[in-house]
Image (tube, helix red, strand yellow):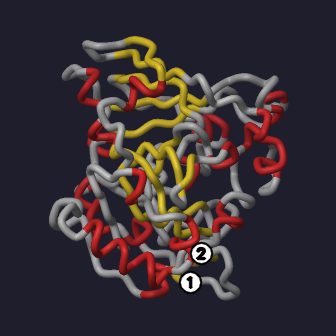
Amino acid sequence: MLIQKPADLQPSEITPPELYARRREFLKTAAVVGAAVLLPRGVVQAATDDDLKLTPYKDVTSYNNFYEFGSGKTDPAEYAGSLKTKPWTVTVEGHCEKPGQYALEDFLAPHTSEERIYRLRCVEAWSMVIPWLGIPLAKILPRFQPTASAKYVEFTTLFDPAQMPGQKTRLLPWPYIEGLRMDEAMHPLTLLATGLYGKELPNQNGAPLRLVVPWKYGFKSIKSIVKIRFTDQPPVTSWNREAPQEYGFYANVNPDVDHPRWSQKKERRIGEFFRRDTLPFNGYADQVAGLYANMDLRKNF
C-alpha cells in the first residue's frame, strides 16, 4: 500500500489521468510530489507491484454497487446521470456544538486543496485499487465540535426517488444509513472522497461526497452523503437492519469469518482471473488492528 498526502497541491501539480494509467510514471511523479508530506509514521507500509496495479478507470466507473440506482453492477453507470450534485448541502446534527446545514464548499472548507490518498477498496468478494482524491474525515469532524457524548458518527445518503430510481424499490430501507465508531471515523485512513483518478467523483461512484474506509467491506463506504449526525449509540445501519445475521455494524474485513452464504477467504481483484487470499483488515492490519483490541471479531463482525 502506498499512501501520499500532498497538503497544498495546485491544479498544475495534479497528475492527469493518463499518467495514472501509466503506473511507472505515476510512481515517479508521486515520489517527487509527495515525498515530504506522507501520513504519520506507522501508517505507510511497503507494497508489491501487484498491490500498486491500478484498476482501469473504465472498470472503476462502470462496475459498481450503488443500489439507489439499481441492484446490477452496471446500473449505476447507466442511471446515475439523473443525479444533480450542484448545489449540494450537508446537514450536521446530534451531539455537537456547531450543528447546521452547510453548502458542500463550506462543509469541506478550509481544505480547498484536495489531498491525494492511494487506496485499496475491498467490496465483498471483489476489490479494486483506486487513486482517490479527498480529505481525511479527521480534518473535518472537529470543526463541528462534537461533545463528549459523541461516541459514533452516522451518515445518511440523499433520499430522492425521482433522481435515484432504485429508491422506488423495497430492496433496502431508504435512505441508506451507515455509521462508524468515533475512533474509526477519526483514524487517518478514513477518507471523505470527492474524486478519483484526478477527476471529480462520477455520480455512479458516489458524487459529490462519499466515505472511504479501506479496511472495511465496501458497503460501509456510503455514497452521496447529505447528513452527518453525532450519536451516543451505534447507528442502526441499512444492511444491519435488513439482514443482521449477515451484516454486522463493524464490517471489518475478516477472512476467518464466512458470510452465511459464501466464504470470505478469497477475493477477486477486478481484471484478474485468479482469486487471491483475503488479508485481515484488507491488508491494513498494522494500521488499524489496535482499534479492536480485546474485541471478539467473530461476534463483532
Residue position marked by numbered label 2 in the rendering: 267
Q: Is residue 299 visible?
A: no
Q: CA distance from mark 1 to mark 2?
A: 6 Å
Location of residue 273 (image quadrant)? bottom right
Residue at left 43%, top 43%?
192
Label 1 Cα crowd, 10 Å radius (few <14 / some 14-19 / many 20+)? some
Q: Secondary structure at mark 1?
A: strand
Residue nearer the viewer, 212 or 261: 212
Could you say where residue 168 lies in the image, as x and y percent from the top left?
84, 28
- The quarter of the picture where the N terminus appears is bottom left
Disc 1, disc 2: CB below 8 Å?
Answer: yes
Residue nearer the viewer, 279 or 205: 205
Can you say whether 216 is above or below 172 in the image?
below
Q: Can you tell which mark lies on residue 181?
A: none
Could you say where residue 112 lies in the image, as x and y percent from the top left?
36, 37
Q: Earlier in the sequence, mark 1 or mark 2?
A: 2
The kind of residue tagged 1 is Arg
Can you say whether 191 is above or below 275 in the image?
above
Residue at left 31%, top 34%?
140
Could you say where residue 5 lies in the image, as x and y percent from the top left?
30, 58
Q: Is residue 160 left or right of residue 186?
A: right
Residue at left 45%, top 64%?
15
Residue at left 52%, top 36%?
178
The kind of residue tagged 2 is Glu
Residue position marked by numbered label 1 in the rendering: 276
